[in-house]
Amino acid sequence: MILYKAADGIARITLNRPEKRNALSPELIAALTDSLAQSAKDQAIRVVLLTGAGQDFCAGMDLASLDRTAEAGVLDHLETARHLADLFLAMRHHPRPIVAAVKGRALAGGCGLATACDLILAAESAQFSYTEVKIGFVPAIVMAILRRSVSEKRAFELVTTGEAITAAEARAIGMINRVYPDAEFDASVQAYAAELAEKSASAVGLSKKLLYHTDGMTFEAALDAGVHGNALARMTEDARRGIARFVKRS
């Protein structure tokens, strides 16, 4: 269900249900959560790369598993929904940057999974859509993240129309970071992840934590958090070495 490979500071986590277009079953969500925890504990990991096996990144929630819970009560539905929310929290609190590499389609919950990553790289032919509305459902959990990625009106349009947008359109609205030609996608993703892995792990990790920590803060509180982050960063071994190299060159 999940393929995990760690090499050269990069943990590659692959959703491995190509016959189901990598649909998110409860079992896959649990396995993905475990894989993220594994990568978080490995001090050698600098970057987590999330991909999908086969033609599509992820087709969203496994509707067959949802159909089996049709007669479940509200507490059961709350529990299963909480598992996805916990996955998104684990991604947000992960000490390393998580990069989604999207080929093919990222639909509904699959689009939400990509959006929950820190960075999104897409093949030129990739498509993104929140299709939940087409079956009377709501992309409820990911809205907290989507709203922070795009404008309010664009987010409203995406979740209420279910329209598919191209990788170029997604980049234009700030939903994703980079778009690469299909033929160069795998090599470009590897090069991007490798370059990110070469950066100071402490600096990148502290930057991620501080950026998300300031969500919802007042301006004054965010500045105060920045003061503490600045002081902490100065005390890291990476910063000390970097400053010493700079001073020596100058």
Image (cartoon, rainbow, N blue to C red):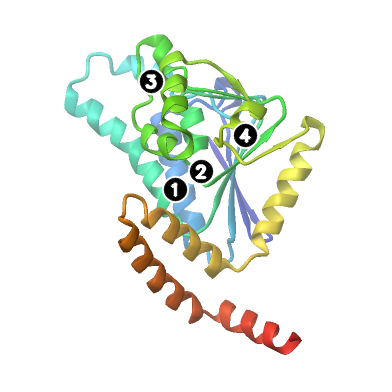
Give the x, y percent position of residue 126: 66, 26
Element at badge 2? loop
Rounded to the nearest angstrom, the CA distance separating label 2 from label 4 is: 15 Å
The residue mark sitting in front, 2 or 3, is: 2
Give the percent coordinates (x, y) of residue 146: 44, 34
Q: Amino acid at mark 3?
A: Ser
Q: Residue at x 60, y 69 (%)?
A: 200
Q: Which residue is mark 2?
A: 117
**Residue where numbered disc 3 is placed:** 65
Q: Is residue 202 above or below residue 29?
A: below
Residue placed furthest toward the right: 183
* Residue displayed at 56% across by 32% down: 173
Give the mark, 1 or 2, whose residue is nearer the N terminus: 1
Report, in whole angstroms, how far the alpha carbon at label 4 lies from the one at label 3: 32 Å
> Residue 158: x and y, percent?
47, 22
- Label 2 close to label 3 by CB (< 8 Å): no
Q: Nearer the viewer, mark 2 or mark 4?
A: 4
Q: Which type of secondary structure does the marked residue at label 3 adopt?
A: helix
Q: CA distance from mark 1 to mark 2?
A: 7 Å
Whether tag 1 and tag 2 are in contact, CB under 8 A, the answer is yes
- Mark found first going from the N terminus, 4 or 3: 3
For the point 56% across and 28% down, the residue is: 17
- The residue that mark 4 highlights is 171
Mark 2: few, some, or many residues within 10 Å (few <14, many ≥20)?
A: many
| Residue 91, numbered label | 1
